[in-house]
Image (tube, rainbow, N blue to C red):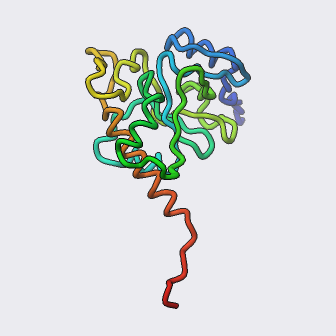
Amino acid sequence: MSLSVSVPSPRVPSEDDTRTWYERVLGWACAGGPPPQLVTGVRFDVLELPSDAGAALLGRPGFAATGPVAVMGRRMRFLIAPGGAEELEGLLDWLEWGGVALDLTAVGAGGRITAPVPPGRAPGESPRGAAVWLRPPELGCEASLPALPGAGRGGGPGLCAEPAGPDLVRLVAAAATECHRARLGRRAPQPLAFS
């Protein structure tokens, strides 16, 4: 006698589940939808770059504790301290990247990003191209997001599982370098001048 057992499919989180997790568990503001949008400039800003450059950045020594990181399509999003988006252009100029086409942007006050599916909610069931967490946020991790040095930020004990990562200047410098390298790597090979 054979026994047949039916295993239910994983449950895909509803928009309400996603919104509830962000608003009630993390205390982050959501707007719009579907899918829900996370409001930037309040608890965090976002540094956004091509995913190939972001993957190279994550592989650099010293960037293991960068903080929450999400990916959507071909873009990677690094959460940074509120106000960091306003500093991007000035930092790029100061780091001598001003005027270079890097495909490195920031979303700050008044902006929104698509809310990634909460971690552990729908393994393998996210729609293609949906925003997903590579490094999910934890309650209170905003205290250790990359900020300008001396900005009075820093997590207290127990706020985040990982140690504080690089400050905003180091993150932007490394991100600019990886964006430039990725851009050069995507270019078609040029014929030699003497051929």
User: Taking 90 as reference, is 40 above or below it?
Assistant: above
- Residue 63, position as x, y percentages in the image: 33, 40
Q: Point out the image quarter for the N terminus.
A: top right
Tell me the residue at 30%/15% (across/down).
158
Residue 130, quarter of the rendered image: top right
Tell me the residue at 26%/23% (across/down).
150
Name the residue nearer the viewer: 139 or 4. 139
Side (left or right) of 77 relative to 127: left
- Residue 24, position as x, y percentages in the image: 54, 8
Side (left or right) of 80 relative to 15: left
- Residue 113, position as x, y percentages in the image: 60, 28
User: Taking 185 as reference, is 161 above or below it?
Assistant: above
Tell me the residue at 60%/46% (across/down).
74
Q: Residue furthest top?
A: 24
Q: How many marks?
A: 0
Residue 132, quarter of the rendered image: top right
- Residue 62, position as x, y percentages in the image: 28, 42
Name the residue nearer the viewer: 18 or 123. 18
Name the residue nearer the viewer: 65 or 43. 43
User: Taking 193 as reference, is 72 above or below it?
Assistant: above
Tell me the residue at 48%/52% (across/down).
100
